[in-house]
Image: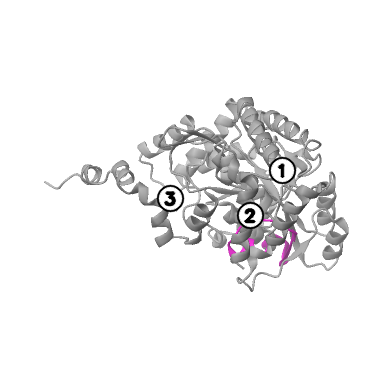
Amino acid sequence: MPADPDRTAAASFDLAALIADRGAERYELHGRHLNPQLPRMLHTIGFDKYYERAKGPYFYDAEGNEYLDMLAGFGIFALGRHHPVVRSAVQQVMDLDLPDLVRFDCSPLPGLLAERLLSYAPGLDRVFFGNSGTEAVETALKFARYATGRRRVLYADHAFHGLTTGSLSVNGESGFRKGFDPLLPDTAIPLGDLGALAKELRRGDVAALIVEPIQGKGVLAPPPGWLRAAQALLHEHRALLICDEVQTGIGRTGEFFAYQHEEGVLPDLVCAAKALSGGYVPVGATLGKSWIFEKVYSSMDRVLVHSASFGANAQAMAAGLATLEVMREEKVVENARQVGDQLRERLAALVDRYELLAEVRGRGLMIGIEFGRPKSLKLRTGWTALQAARKGLFAQMVVVPLLQRHRILTQVSGDHLEVIKLIPPLIITERDVDRFVDAFTDIMDDAHRGSGLMWDFGRTLVKQAVGSR
């Protein structure tokens, strides 16, 4: 009698034992087989921690120390890690033994998730499910070009829309683009510049403008009313508005989508991802108006003209449905707005207190903390030395002690930026706000003494920055 393959596999594979046996090799394994610069960078700044487990907005190391996550996996873990409802949904869908990805059937789960997702975006009618944010952007670019019959897409300076070739073509950061040319013939305009937009539209070859309602790099937003005015200009020239909500969407800014902060804005296409599956399964979604989808999928011959091998898989769809249910039941979007306002206001109140602190901006739980040139000679000397070595080192000087001294994980918002970006799980509480503000205040006090461990670390960063040139 043949062995039961399920029982044989279960007996031979023990994931927990494998991690226990080889987990201590994590940085060595990564350096040998994956990106060699990641472990090097983490060792350099002291971020080479060994996290053992996570729950909600916290990590825990082997000694049981708690770390506050203000990064959320670059915005993926809106509900924190291992939310019990989402985990249960993934377990349930695995236990159902569904005939997933048959290809020649229509599973109920994608339709149900599309229905639920579209209920948060009045005026949009259809969804394409892929596997990531960059894939959602690629879909929007393809659909916009096909629907309009034009080839050029406009994007904003400093935008980030992904790193695959199409999305890289509308990426406004030169560091990501360098060495990957030739890209698609798309064109950058300054964020918030209606004149530049109108000039490009007059050429008559623009399919769309793709824009983040709040840019992730630097946490920058266009001026009030710009998005609505840009939409009107685009439609006047028969071009489309694409809102990239991969990071700003699914409640991050205190509305379900960030474009909803501005009355009268209704994008033609919206890109979503990251938080949609609660962090369990890769997922991407491109929402759009019916006429666009009907042009792309115009006949039975074109039924598979755009598809994704793992798009709309059962695990991702189940996780997405559970995530939206949790967000509704636990009022997660409202919490992002209320707690985010509290955190931003408390940090903004420190601007007058610290001359190195230039501005606090953002919406909901997407907050940028920008540092700037101090007035006093003592602080200005240290600041100038850091800037001469590499712009962005002061922000890194703040990020490192936040982790090392206060066990709070944050990030510098982008290369050569003196901005820290806070994108924590949307479930953080007033207690977490207190913890962050207290820690940030302690580090700012230290920085404004102009000496001590923080500036010693800054000198180390300067040496490393100069040595890497």
Q: Which residue is drawn at 60% across and 70% down?
A: 180
Q: Residue at x 24, y 46 (%)?
A: 9
Q: Is mark 1 on a helix, strand or loop?
A: strand
Q: In which quarter of the image is residue 138?
A: bottom right
Q: Quadrant of residue 57?
A: top right
Residue that label 3 marks: 101
The magenta stretch spans residue 281:
no
Q: Position of residue 221 (x, y in %)?
A: 77, 47
Towards the viewer: 268 or 430: 430
The location of residue 25, given as percent across then percent down, is 36, 51
Task: Look at label 2 and name its amino acid.
Answer: Arg
Q: Looking at the image, how many numbered discs can be counted on the residues?
A: 3
Residue 175: % across, % down: 65, 64
Task: Using the numbered discs, state the Cα–Cα distance from disc 1 to disc 2 in whole angstroms.
Answer: 22 Å
Q: Which is nearer the N-term, disc 3 or disc 1?
A: 3
Tag 1 residue: 369
Q: Residue furthest right?
A: 195
Work out whether residue 71 or residue 288 is closer to the camera in this orientation and state it. 71
Question: At numbered mark 3, what does the secondary structure look like: helix, strand or loop?
Answer: loop
Helix, strand or loop at label 2? It is helix
Q: Name the residue under label 2.
A: 459
Image quadrant assignment for residue 162: bottom right
Query: Image point 76% across, 53% down: which residue?
Result: 381
Judge whether residue 165 can be spotted in this image.
yes
Amino acid under disc 3: Leu
Q: Do the residues labelled 1 and 2 touch (CB within 8 Å)?
A: no
Task: Look at the image and give the residue range highlighted in magenta.
Answer: 146-170
